[in-house]
Image: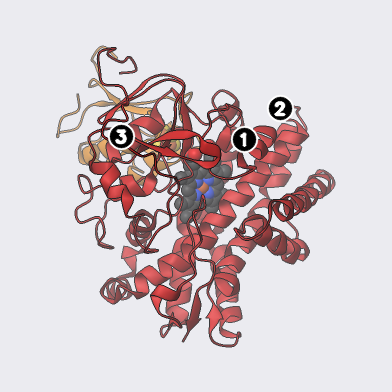
Chain colours: A red, B orange
């Protein structure tokens, strides 16, 4: 399966005259960008231009996305000049820091193995009561705010930062500092310098955390890594810092963005919300359906082909960059009946919202539970929750790696 | 291969597993996730009632670590 017929069609620009810019913004927060359907239907690979003028192929069909991401020739290494980074500075930072999300096996495998034990189903189930307590506390905070309140800043961001800090072992007194720093580092409006300064502050905090946990270990992820692999010399301190940094960022920004979007998605489908209220056992399926429907991490899957990768629409030649569109795959009508419809009883959990292949989200079990508890707590405690502005006035994040809304004014 | 009556052999390769836990989520009677995050087989052969769940796990495993082999007694 990994060999390619040399006579098979390789990626041809075909009838594609222009090379559009990528990423493209969404016109509706609850649907993939409008151009994806055309990319999926086209019987050839589509070429786009990313930051800095580099070219990349788009992969948009469900089976192609899975094939491409599981292919041994799909490289995530950001040190490769062809790597299709989406923003300024992104490639340089990733090439220098080498977070494992941008590494290939066997380096990737070594780091990932240090972390998977922290996110097992059992471990995450054990965290449930703690996550419930966090959400209950933060929903009271939301209710204490003047109306309209902001579902992002006053709830989702507080939930996701608290949960990730507890998991890592960041002391609660550093939480506000952490919230401030990550709001800058994840912001689209901040300048490159501001982002750089925020990242430095963040790494300073994590650096002190490593020292702290070596002396006073707790029952947390950083303590176990510091006193395990770091103490045994299996990972350098510099690499450990990067790996903690990516876990923290990937775990925080995804949940922060997914929680408000998912809450709105349910509020605009009252029939679906009624189903959940009548039968709470539907929640796990509903969470997977929301993850599929929203696909917030749509364009995180940037790759370079190091071997030819044969797909249904042609072959990505070795050396070329590609982007596996998770929202494209999750809205493929060949796999999901009426993909635009939110259907909490769909019970088709094999979406690719967490990616596919060796990089498939290491925190997915936590991500699911966090989303479920954050939504249930919010919607049960605040049954009259509603948007305070028309949907069309919601400030959407421009094209960023993780899709989200910057602000969601709500009232109740 | 596996038949609707069950009986196929389940294969799980820890060297390939990336610890995503998909298998244990969809077929908890057949796969478990050890404390180190890697896949552990709870049974050797697919139980009769678990065929669909195991096929689902094979389909979903992101790394190709879980597979179905010939029924026990076969060449595997
Ligand atoms: C709504 C929730 C989430 C979504 C949609 C999501 C999505 C994703 C996706 C699509 C990838 C694959 C990236 C690639 O293939 O290049 C990924 C990887 C990753 N995610 Fe998540 N994620 C979520 C929650 C979390 C949480 C809660 C954590 C940790 C606490 C986390 C940590 C990570 C890490 C560390 C990676 C890199 C894994 C690797 O490269 O092996 N994510 N995530
Ligand atoms: S689904 Fe595959 S990668 Fe994930 S734990 Fe099971 S065997 Fe390992």
The Cα–Cα distance between marks 1 and 3, rounded to whole angstroms, is: 30 Å
Which quarter of the rendered picture does the N terminus of chain A lie within? top left
Residues packed near mark 1 inside 10 Å, few (<14), some (14 to 19) or many (20 plus): some
Label placed on residue A114: 1
Would residue A126 be found to the left or right of residue B25 on screen?
right
- Asked if both marks, 1 and 3, belong to the same chain, the answer given is yes
Q: Are marks 1 and 3 in contact (CB under 8 Å)?
A: no
Name which residue lies at 78% across and 65% down: A173
Q: Which mark is residue A234?
A: 2
Please tell me whether mark 3 or mark 2 is closer to you in this view.
3
Please state the horizontal and vertical placement of residue A314, each as a whole percent of the image.
28, 27
Which mark, residue A64?
3
Residue A325 is drawn in which quadrant? top left
Whole-Å distance between the Cαs marked 2 and 1?
10 Å
Query: Residue A343's image quarter?
Result: bottom left
Earlier residue among tags 3 and 2: 3
Q: Chain of mark 2?
A: A
Instruction: Tell me what residue is drawn at x 71 percent, y 46 percent.
Output: A222
Ligand 2 falls in quadrant: top left
SS assignment at label 2: loop
Residue A211 in the image: state x and y as whole percent.
83, 45
The numbered disc on residue B8 is none
* Disc 2 to disc 1: CB gap under 8 Å: yes
Outermost residue on the left side: it is B4
- Residue drawn at the location 56% of the way across and 72% of the way down: A155
Disc 3 packing (10 Å; few <14; some 14–19; many ≥20):
many
| Left or right, residue A62 beside residue A58 | left
């Amino acid at each position: 399966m990994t060999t390619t017929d040399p006579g098979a069609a390789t990626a041809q620009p075909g009838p594609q005259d222009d090379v559009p810019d990528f990423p493209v913004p969404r016109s509706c927060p609850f649907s993939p960008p409008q151009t994806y359907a055309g990319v999926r239907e086209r019987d050839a690979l589509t070429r786009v231009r990313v930051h800095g003028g580099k070219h990349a192929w788009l992969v948009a069909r469900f089976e192609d996305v899975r094939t491409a991401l599981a292919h041994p020739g799909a490289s995530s290494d950001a040190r490769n000049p062809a790597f299709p980074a989406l923003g300024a500075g992104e490639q340089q930072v990733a090439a220098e820091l080498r977070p494992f999300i941008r590494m290939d096996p066997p380096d990737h495998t070594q780091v990932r193995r240090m972390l998977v034990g922290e996110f097992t189903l059992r471990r995450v189930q054990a965290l449930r009561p703690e996550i419930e307590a966090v959400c209950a506390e933060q929903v009271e905070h939301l209710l204490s705010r003047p109306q309209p309140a902001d579902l992002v800043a006053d709830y989702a961001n507080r939930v996701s930062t608290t949960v990730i800090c507890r998991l890592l072992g960041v002391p609660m007194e550093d939480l506000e500092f952490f919230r401030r720093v990550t709001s800058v580092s994840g912001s689209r409006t901040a300048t490159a310098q501001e982002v750089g300064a925020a990242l430095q502050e963040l790494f300073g905090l994590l650096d002190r955390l490593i020292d702290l946990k070596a002396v006073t270990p707790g029952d947390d992820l950083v303590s176990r890594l510091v006193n395990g692999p770091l103490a045994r010399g299996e990972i350098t301190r510099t690499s450990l810092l990067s790996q903690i940094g990516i876990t923290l960022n990937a775990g925080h920004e995804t949940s922060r963005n997914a929680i408000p979007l998912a809450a709105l998605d349910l509020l605009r489908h009252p029939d679906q919300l009624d189903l959940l209220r009548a039968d709470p056992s539907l929640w796990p399926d509903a969470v997977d359906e929301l993850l599929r429907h929203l696909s917030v991490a749509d364009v995180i899957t940037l790759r370079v082909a190091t071997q030819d990768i044969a797909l249904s629409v042609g072959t990505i030649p070795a050396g070329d960059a590609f982007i596996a569109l998770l929202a494209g795959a999750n809205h493929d009508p060949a796999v999901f009946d009426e993909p635009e419809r939110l259907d909490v009883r769909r019970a088709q959990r094999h979406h690719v919202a967490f990616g596919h292949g060796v990089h498939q989200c290491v925190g997915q079990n936590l991500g699911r539970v966090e989303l479920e508890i954050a939504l249930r707590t919010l919607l049960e405690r605040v049954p009259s929750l509603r948007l305070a502005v028309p949907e069309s006035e919601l400030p959407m994040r421009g094209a960023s790696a993780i899709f989200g809304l910057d602000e969601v004014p709500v009232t109740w | 291969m596996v038949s609707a009556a069950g009986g196929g052999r389940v294969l799980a390769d820890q060297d390939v597993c990336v610890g995503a836990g998909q298998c244990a989520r969809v077929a908890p009677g057949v796969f478990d996730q050890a404390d180190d995050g890697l896949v552990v087989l709870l049974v050797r052969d697919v139980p009769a009632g678990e065929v669909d769940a195991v096929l689902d796990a094979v389909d979903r495993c992101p790394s190709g670590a879980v597979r179905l082999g010939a029924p026990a007694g076969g060449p595997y």
